[in-house]
Image (cartoon, rainbow, N blue to C red):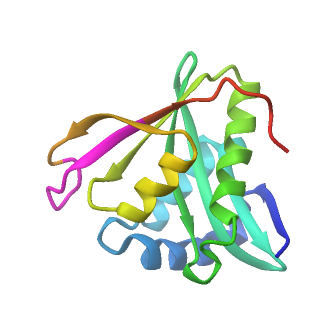
Amino acid sequence: MSVRIRPYQPEDMPSLLRIEAQAFTVDAWDRRLLQWYADTCPKLFLIAEIGARVAGYCVARPTRTGFADLDSIAVRRRYRRHGVGTRLLRAAINRLRRQGVHTLSLMVRRDNKEAIAFYHRHGFTRTRTVHGYYEDNATAWRMAARIEMPVIA
């Protein structure tokens, strides 16, 4: 499966809304929030494409000198476990590293075992627990990884 990573384009929005609804259900972002990220972080709002189909996306945001947050990463269910998430994460890390970022952090639901395993495989470790982080009062883990590594193709 050939995965191409490219910047977000406005015509991607309908696909992203479907991916959000499928991947996050109660935590899904709406059009307004996705558009805010597209406007705010255009170089770090990345789309994974397989053929002509949007397979997933990620968005990262520098927060202060040397640090960034991976605010979201989602892959269409049928393309999970095919390297799409890894390609998106690596592409984001490469761009962040070029901007001088050395630490990437994220929030994940404490009960999202699949996502936590994915992040562990990519060098993330839990740094703290945040009770009541989500709108439904669910607990989150803050995870972080050092990204001082060679740029990965």
**Residue depicted at 52% across the width and 80% down the height:** 18
How far across and down, in percent of the image, does residue 144 sit? 45, 34
Say if the magenta span includes residue 135. yes
Relative vertical location of residue 79 with respect to residue 137 in this rendering, above or below? below
Relative vertical location of residue 11 with respect to residue 39 in this rendering, above or below? below
Quadrant showing the N terminus: bottom right
102 vs 68, nearest the viewer: 102
How far across and down, in percent of the image, does residue 81 sit? 61, 71
Q: Residue furthest top?
A: 65
Q: What segment is highlighted magenta in the picture? A: 133-143
**Residue depicted at 85% across the width and 71% down the height:** 2
**Residue depicted at 46% across the width and 60% down the height:** 32
114 vs 7, nearest the viewer: 114
Q: Is residue 1 left or right of residue 131?
A: right
Task: Report the magenta stretch's main SS.
Answer: loop
Q: Tell me if residue 65 can be seen.
A: yes
Dividing the picture into quadrants, the one containing residue 50 is: bottom right
Relative vertical location of residue 43 with respect to residue 108 in this rendering, above or below? above
